[in-house]
Amino acid sequence: MNKATLPIVARLRSLQAAIRFAAGGARVIAEADDRNPLAQLLRAANETMLGRSLQFDSAGGPSLTLDVSGRRVLRVTAAPGLAGAESCLGAEVLEDEHKDDLIKLMQAVATPRYELRVTSGPIGRGGEEVSVGLPVALLADLVLIDLNDLAADDSAEEEEAVPAPAPERPSAAAPGAGLAGLAEAIGLGLQAWLIVGGPDDDRSNGAEEMVSHLQGFLDDEREAVDRQLDLLSPEPGAPVCVMLGATLIEGHSILVARLGGGLLLGIVEGECTGAALAAWRDVLT
Amino acid sequence: MSESLGAVAKAFPQARLVAFADLSSRMILSSAGSLATTQEHLDRLCDQARASFDDPLFSLSVEAFGEPQGAVVMGADAVRVFLRSDTEPADALCCICDHGIDLAAFVAKIRDTLESITHAG
């Protein structure tokens, strides 16, 4: 397929997709079993050309309202139930310095296992000027989401069509949902990470200096880390994910995960326990 | 102490076991929650808490951000949370939770509980 046609085909497919409306005119964009509700949130924003206010409501409670225009997020106008929204709420127009905070808000409202709804309304303030704000495509790049990923949609549909196999050992995770999938699902909070062994061997992300440091540590201590994880597992070599931090809910933490013969080691910044746990559950199912 | 642990278990029903341990003597001193446990289970939980704060990950943590006081161990069927006191590192809470727990809120709660127990003792 011609690469230039991908956004068009993706849009056509989304128009063909079954839509479920909820009370109040909200549209359900991610069901509770959706593997990546954040992608659905970003796609909804990316499909918004004319200035609109998009209110995203999670069945888990939190809500995030964005002014969106021209595939750009102009501002955050409400964020009930979401911590850390002050800087974005205080910005007349979102700028580059807000992108990390905005992504955290999006991740917090688009959490797996909760239905996500969107309600569209008139934009709160001027949206005619569309050269400002944060491009949705930039936000998607930062969380490693391809807005036009047709292959992901195909695989999801195939999974729905095929009866679920009998539960196997947790390490038999679906392709793509292994340690690299875990890292991607945790998102920006995982500042730097590296995988050694297993199907995702040698994959990494983050500042080169930090990744290099993690690599050096594992070069020396891989076996010792495995022995330590064995003490925390029901049996040697079993899947396990550990976060170790000064407080776990602020500052930095270390994340180490073992799955399918591979080992992921990363540095986490800020409160990431919920995202890590949700991502871990996903790779185990 | 029992009341404090019971209050945590009541506030977070997904916390199936909340136990106070003395890591230096490898003993669980008190516990609350719906999970039926044997002494072997409690001993193993205490050993896992000690292992969490051991090398090599302990050294990496110290190098990266300082001495770790909290650990979350995510397994296939449960999450274990270990928290050491800032002032008395041998004092720790060892918890077994369901995967659906709000970890951030839970960690904040048990942090306060642990410090109140430590200071009361």
Image: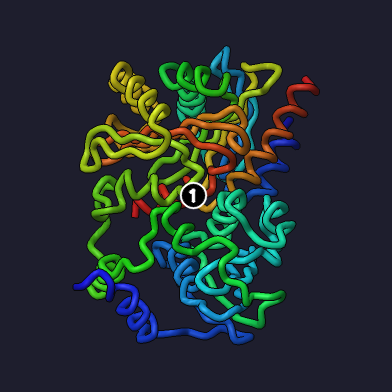
In this view, the residue in front, A111 or A213, is A213
Considering only vertical position in the picture, is A67 above or below B68? below
Quarter holding the N terminus of chain A is bottom left
Q: Is residue A261 visible?
A: no
Q: Is residue A175 left or right of residue A146?
A: left
Q: Is residue A91 visible?
A: yes
Where is residue A140 drawn, in percent x and y?
Answer: 44, 59
Image quadrant of residue A33?
bottom left
Residue visible at 32% across and 18% down in the picture: A221
Kind of residue indicated by mark 1: His
Q: Is residue A1 left or right of residue A211?
A: left
Residue visible at 61% across and 38% down in the picture: A249
Label 1: element kind? loop
Where is residue B21 drawn, in percent x and y?
Answer: 60, 23
Quarter holding the C terminus of chain A is bottom left
Where is residue A69 drawn, in percent x and y?
Answer: 57, 74
Residue named by callout 1: B99
